[in-house]
Structure formats: structure tokens, C-alpha cells
Amino acid sequence: MRFILIVLDGLRPDMVSPAAMPALAGLMARGTRFANARSVFPSETRVATPSLVTGCRPAAHGMVGNTLFDRALAPDRLLRTKDAEDYRILSAGAESPLQRPGIGEHLAAAGLSFAVVSAGTPGQTLVASPAARRLGQFRWNAADTDTAEARAVAEHLGPTPPASIPNLARSRHAARVLTEHVLPRHRPDVALFWCPEPDISFHYRGLGHPETALAIAEADACVAHIRDWRDAQPDAREIGLIVLSDHGHVTGDRKIALAELMARDGLPAGAGGTAITVAPAGAPGIWLNDPSLAPQVADWLARQPWAGPLLANDPALLPGRSAPLALLEANHPRAADLVLLFAGDEGPDAFGLPGQAPFDAPDVPEGGGMHGGLHRRELATVLAFEGGPFTPGITMKGMADLTDVAPTILHLFGLAPAGLQGRVLHQAWDPWADAPAEPATIPLPGGFVLEGGRHGGRLYPTALRRG
């Protein structure tokens, strides 16, 4: 029994169709599809990746944002977890910043193997398999040049194509690394393949742009390539495919330079070395040198029509005016003191696609795709199990999120390590285990409502909306 995880970064499930993505649509129809799969909060890649591999939400694994501020480690600037150097700074001398072991470590403890092939960022690949060097596991990133894996791949398949928008050649090359090098030569029990599209094109071209359509088609071609490799193997019946996305996307209809606007109106805000440090994001983090500044920040935000509710790492910081980050299992000593949620809506974008929201990201153009918050289009993800032990041709109504994938895979190997928070998705092979979630509606400050579902008391957020 073997499993291949295929992650299509940022893919919205409502954009999967037989016309746009025939391979993926066919695979989802043949397998077990989870129609109510969700990301975690913040719905960002370097939060989603550790949630996927550790089976835990950010409060437990400790990676709470793509961009972070840590006054002790880097007092004058933000740390960007996509960069290997900032990842090492955040690790503070440890093997990684994560505070829970990943699936690679659990598999190794049972004598099983794990491999990662990624055309995502270096930081994403490091957080997917932080113990790879110690455990002798294969880990390759498209930006690698001086690792043993990079040299072996280059010798076998030639140099990695340069990054581009859309990132077609790199995505295609990474799929070849998986099917022509890793799977036949290393035969990992579990392999994780990370395709950077359509996320890159969503961000920089927009969700409905013609070049984005090329990126979606290339992501689908990667699925087809991996499926065809599996189907050609003598043990094809024993190889299960798990296809998912780490988050969705919403169209960024208004660009908000939060720190600049705050500073313009007299608040001491900046990107590090200031009394108020702001990390740009789909849900910006706000760190305060002095907690007494919190009411001023809240007062200023209350006057902004684009601002949604505030979440607080410490519920006592803004009592009655914020909701706790713990509600979303995103509280942690590394987390921002306050996190701003933008007030989005379901209105159509310039391409006619539903879902728009303001955003703060210096390099993403207005009209580009964005994620990180609690908009229903950011939280909704693809999740399908096909082949191997999985039930064919069925759609599950029960909710699931990224943290449920690792416990499910480990369960199928007969493993149940302590410390995982996710649920085993028995529905993937036992449809009778499916059950709809208990609906949850949670009032938030400022007249907003968080919708979601509960399984066994665990909240799966679905959408932030105006009350």
C-alpha cells in the first residue's frame, strides 16, 4: 500500500470542471470527494502545510502566518517564512519552527518512508518535511541547487526551468521529478507533490485571466501525469491518490496598505522597529509594543468601511471588541496581538467569478487573487481520495480540513500516534460513517457572523459574513 498526495496550491473547488480540469474532475468523480473540505486559519500556505503534515492546527504546531514578527529574533523587520534564511531564524537553533512532528517523522518511527517534491517556495518545502535530513528522507524543491537531491535530479532530468508566471515549465518538471526519479528510484510509502499553480497565476494575473486558464490546465496535466504513472504500475491497485488544495482564493478588489494608512493618521505603525508592527496579508497581523495601544488601533479600524472584526491572541486585550484567536485554534505565543479580518462579499469580480475582499499585499496587484482570511472562497478546498482502499464514485457531506489528512493516512498504515488533533476520515472507505456537521453560527464584534460546522465539538469554519 502506497499513497501519493497531490497538492494544487490555491485551487478553488468551484473552479474544477470537466471542461477546465478534465483529469481532476474525472478523478474526483471516480473517488471519494469531500464537498465540505476546508482550510485552516490563517488560510495561508505556510500555515496550511504544517497543518497538513502534523495533523494539528496552528495553536499546536506554532506556524501562525506566512509573515511574522518576532521581536526577540528580528527586532527591526518581518520574517517571511517562504525564505529559507528567515525559516532558519524563526527556528532559533532548533530543527524547525514546528512544535509538533510531521507525518514524515511518524512514518519513519514505523519504518516507513516519506518523500517531498515541490515547486513551491523553499520555506513551504522545509515545513513540509522539516526532519528530512536527519531521517534520510528525500526532499526536493525547485529552487534547490546544492543539495544531494538537487544534484541527483539535475543529473537524471536536466536543470530545473526558471520560475515564471504562469509557472508552467516548473510545474511540469516537478511532476517529472516525482514520476521519473522519486517514485521509481525511492519508492516512498507516502509521497507529497506540491504544484505551485494555480496560486501564482491567481495572485498575479487574476482568477479568470487567460494566462490563469493555462495554469489551471497545467495543474490538471500534473494530475493526469501522476495518475497515468500510477495506472501503469503492476501494483496500481495498491496506490491511493489524495488530491487537495491548501486554501482557496478571493479576488482582491481593493488594496489596503494598512501600516501606511495607520501611520498617515498618526498611529506609530510600520513593518518592524515601530510601536505597532503590521504584517501585510489577507488577514494582517498587528503586534503592539505597548498593549495600551490596542484601543487606539480598534478605534481607528472601526472608522474604516473595509475593516471587519478583530481577533485577539489574548482575549483580555480588547474585551468586548475582539474575538479570541483561540476560537479558530490559531492562538500561540508567536501569533500577532491582533489580527484584522477584512469585510468581503460574494459579489462578482471582473471575470464574473463570485467573491471579493480587500487585502494588504504589496506585490499582488489590485484585482489579483488573495487568501488568508475567512471568506468562504478562501476557506473552501479540494479534497478527494481515489484508488487504493478508497470508495469509488461517492460524495461525502461531512466536514473535513487539512488536519484530517495525516491521521487518515497513518490510520491506514495501522498507526495512531499521540498528539494529532485531526480526525480519521473513515468515510473515505466506509460511506456509512459520513454524517453532516452540526451547523454553528457565532456572532463576532462589529455585526459580523462566523458560520461553520461542528464535528464532535470541533469547529470547522466555513465563512465570515455580515450579520
Image (cartoon, grey):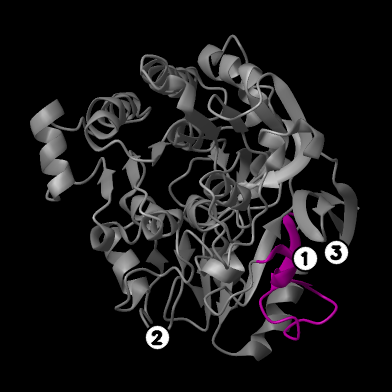
Residues 371 and 98: in front is 98
* Precedes in sequence: disc 1 or disc 2: 2
Name the residue at 60% across, 53% down: 403
Give the residue at x 71% y 63%. Answer: 328
Can you give x and y, in whole percent of width and height, for residue 360 in the image?
55, 54
Q: Which mark is residue 446?
A: 3
Q: Is residue 349 visible?
A: no
Q: Residues within 10 Å of mark 3 (few under 14, many from 20)?
A: some
Secondary structure found at label 2? loop
Q: Which residues are magenta?
A: 306-329
The image quarter containing residue 432 is top right
Q: Which mark is residue 303?
A: 1
Name the mark on residue 72: 2
The N terminus: image quadrant: top left
Q: CA distance from mark 1 to mark 3?
A: 11 Å
Number of labelled discs?
3
**Where is residue 264, by image quadrant?**
bottom right
| Amino acid at circle 2 | Ala
